[in-house]
Structure formats: C-alpha cells, structure tokens
Amino acid sequence: MSLQPDIATTSDRDGLSALEIAQAVKSRKLSALSATEAALSRIEKYDPLLNSFTDVTADRARARARAVDAAIAAGKHAGPLAGVPFAVKNLFDVQGLPTRAGSKINRDLPPASRDATLIERLEAAGAVMVGALNMGEYAYDFTGENIHDGPSRNPHDVTRMTGGSSGGSGSAVGGGLVPLALGSDTNGSIRVPSSFCGIFGLKPTYGRLSRARSFPFVSSFDHLGPLARSVGDLALAYDAMQGPDPDDAVCTTRPAEPVSPVLARDIGDVRIAVAGGYFQKNVFPEASEAVGRIARALGATRTVEIPEAARARAAAYVISTCEGASLHLDRLRKRPNDFDPAVRDRLLAGAMIPAPLVDRAQKFRRWYRTQVLELFKSVDVIIAPATPCVAPKLGQATFMLDGVQLPVRANIGIHTQPISFIGLPVVAVPVPLEPMPIGVQIIAAPWREGIALRVAYALERAGAVSAPRPRGL
Amino acid sequence: MAVDPLDDYIDAVSKALGLPVEDAWRPAVRANLEVSLKLARLVDEFALPDDAEPASVFAA
C-alpha cells in the first residue's frame, strides 16, 4: 500500500490553507460548495488508504456550503472561516449520528439531537463540517489503532501509527483531506497525533474551550482543540471557538482573547527555556534532534527543570485510569465483551485503585501546579518533546531504548502527560525530519495560549517547523 | 485458587463492585493493576502536608 504521489498536487484548491480558502470564498474567487466538493473528493480518493473518517456527512456539508454561498451572495458577513471544510473526532456530538467515541457500544446510542458547542461555533464562523473521524476506543489510547473500525493510518507512511487517540484527526489533516480538524486531549491525544502525522495541534488551557456535547474520558484532564497545517489556521479556529459556555461546568467565564490579530507580534521579549531532566531522558535521537533544532531557531540556551515530572506523569496515569473506570463502570458490568479487550482490561484494573491513592494524586496535582507556576515567573515558554520517537509501526508493541525493551503504548505519552496534568496550554509544532516528522511542545503558563502560538508562528516563519505534504512511500 | 496476592484483591473488589473478571482476562487485569499500583506508590510516597487541598476543589 502506498500513497499516490499526487495527493498534494491534484489542483490548487487542494493545497489551500483554511485562511486561504476563507479569503477566496469571501472574495468570491472560490465558492464554499466548490471547496467542500474538493474536500469530499479527496476523502473519497484517499480515505480508503488512510481510514481517517468513520462518517462522511456529505449531504449536510453541501447544504451548509450552499448556505454560506447564499449568505455571501446576499451581501451578509460570511465569517472568518467561510467555506472551510473541517472534520471532528467521533466523540463530538454530531446531530443525527450516535456519538460512538471509537466504541462499538456507543453505536447503540440514539442519534445526537444537537451538535457539540465547538462545531456550532466553527459553523457560525462559516466553516463546513464534512464528517466524523476515527479514534481510539473511548480515547483510552495513544496509538490511533481501533479494533472496531481498523487503524487510522499515517499519511507519511501508511504502515505506521497515526498516534492517538485523535488518530483520524491527525491522519485527515496530515494527509491533506481537510485543512482543519478537532480532537480531544486528555493525556496527549492532540499532541501525539500532531507529532506522528507532522501537523500543528493546540491543546488549550484546561477549561478554555467548551467540552459541551462531547463524550468524556477523564473529566479532570479532558480538553478539546484544533489540529491544522499552519499556526495561522490553528489560531483562526481557536479564536472562533473561544468564549464561555454554561453547558460545560469546567468552561471558563473569562472573555475570549483572540490571538490571530497578535500572531505576528515580535517575540524578542519572550523568555524561552528548554525542559531538562525528565524531558531529556527516554527519548530517541530524533526527539532530541527536533528539540535541539527548535532551541537553536529560538536562540534558547537556558534549561529549566520541571520538578517531579515523573511523579506528575504517575499521578496523571492513576487519576486517568480511575476516572475512566468510573465513567464506564456500568458498561463494564453489562457489556464487557463489546469493549476492545485491551481497553476493558485497563478499565477493570482502574476500577480497583484504592480511593486514598486517587485522592493523594489530586493533592499532589495541586502541589505540582504551584511549583510549575513558580517556574513560569522566570520563563514564558518551555520547550519539550511531544513524543519520544517518530511514529512506530502499526501493531508494534515494544521498542528498544538505551538497550531496554519498553512497551510502546504506555511510553508514547510520557512527555505530554506531565503537562496536561495541570492544564497548561501547548502548541505541538512539526519538525519535518526525514523520513518521518516529529513534534515538539511549546508550553506556556495557563491562559497564555497567545504566547505559545506567537512562538510557533515565529518558528513557522523562520522555516524551522512546517507540515510536510505526504509524498508516498 | 488464587496464586498471586493481587488475585485475592481482584476477586474481592470485582465481587464488591459487581464487575465481571473472566479467567482469560485476569492476567491482563492483574498486569494493568500492578502498573497502576506501582505508579500510585510513587505518588503515595511523596510527603504532602496535612492541609494539602486536592486539585478537585468544589466551589459552592
């Protein structure tokens, strides 16, 4: 199996960014319907290879695109994402579809009666949803593999993992099927597929974007966010989705803080450091190379130690498995044979963690947050690997690191977990190494997505990071 | 007959919670539990003051 070499070059409209599509649609050089048809054609042509989509909502997308075109023809404001095709991880409620969340069990749910808040906000900004995307079962996954729907495949090498759990989101954007996708990130599920598929991903501050009408995993850590092929597109989508939402108890009441207008602001005064210690251990040479390139591009010479990061990762693991088990307790009782056995066995074990250990993990979480916020008094941005390696092979269970054989799935998220544990905003940026790309985390203090996005934008303009077009094998 | 100390625990908790753990699943459940408990111990052995608040503070 290999990608056809023309995936990136079928025609001009196939290589457009979200920003370029919106500008072309608003200036009537391109219709929203034409942009939508182009996306649907790409999906039809390439998704049999990538397996990134589980639902293609073509009728809905065409109707929505026609409405955008009609609004523009009537002289109405079209919105900053006019005509931009996008797709969502299938844990987002999509009106008319059961929200499967990568599972077999949820397919028996009644169809969702209303879209998730973030879909409503993107469509209110003129975007056009074209479908729902493959993911790891119930988001308890770092590989992008799915026993029910088959694995999503890496667009740079279809024998490799996309990363998970937002694997379809990584594959669809990395493969150029859509310029924009939404995913969720509990322990790394936006940043890992961004790294493996060579694209940009934003995990905002915990509570920044509404999670209303999405299927949860670990309420303490669940975040939603965008994946795209450029920083400008990430910011465009992020700005359209911000704002309070009473339908999500965790969503902030802070007013929206648009980033797009300040994206190009100079970063000369931004204090940048590389994460040392834990974040420089257990990495393959490609991860060290990627972090080194970013540090050099930014002139970052300082190293900071994030205290007790290994313990933070451990606490995140414990809380995740316990809260995940709590969420699925009744399904584990009634339909244990309908789970992916590997997910079921992790959840069953999670149900058996003694409560005092979980409580201590939540107390440690507050202590750790205080320490890291102290660190942010002397630094604005911290750089760390997004993944310890490039995308492993599909089905690969172990890898050798420093002469030690380690399980792949459990070790993919070791650098993302200590960060989402306390809800820090992160932009995952793709370093286009050969033959496979790999991501680096640009980490900022809570509510400072703007700084992380500005640094990512500066790196993109300097040519240090970019989303490579897949060339086939 | 339980052969691993954790098996007794798995039997007791699964019975208390009404969770099915078939014999074929037990090795994987035990292995996952061992990893979770090992990581939980790492957190457990970190000294915290008595007045440490959990991150999940409820606001009335």
Image: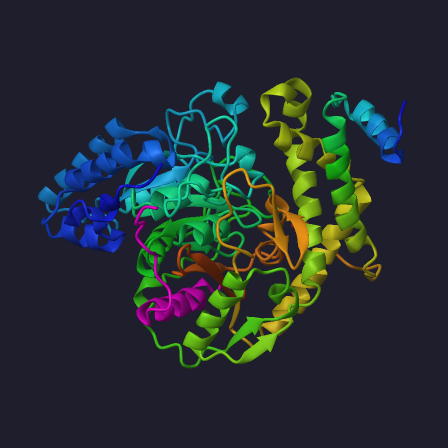
Is residue B55 in sight in this rendering? no
Above-or-below relation of A295 to A140: below
Image spot of residue A332 (x, y percent): 66, 24
Is A418 positioned to the left or the right of A166 in the image?
right
Q: Quadrant of residue A83?
A: top left
Residue span colored magenta: A447-473
Q: Quadrant of residue B33?
A: top right
Image spot of residue A413 (x, y percent): 58, 51
Query: Does the stretch in magenta take in A172?
Result: no
Is residue A403 in sight in this rendering? yes
Q: Quadrant of residue A95?
A: top left
Residue that appears at 78% across and 41% down: B34
Image spot of residue A391 (x, y percent): 48, 49
Image spot of residue A370 (x, y percent): 67, 66
| In front of the other: A148 or A392 | A392
Above-or-below relation of A312 to A322: below
Q: What colour scheme has been applied to the protein in the rendered image?
A: rainbow
Is A65 positioned to the left or the right of A150 in the image?
left
Above-or-below relation of A453 to A172: below
| In front of the other: A334 or A219 | A334
| In front of the other: A387 or B53 | A387
Instruction: Please state, as top left, top right, bottom left or bottom right, where the N terminus of chain A lies in the image.
Output: top left
Query: Does the stretch in magenta take in A451?
Result: yes
Is A228 positioned to the left or the right of B38 in the image?
left
Is A331 positioned to the left or the right of A289 in the image?
right
Count of number-bearing discs: 0
Residue that appears at 69% across and 21% down: A333
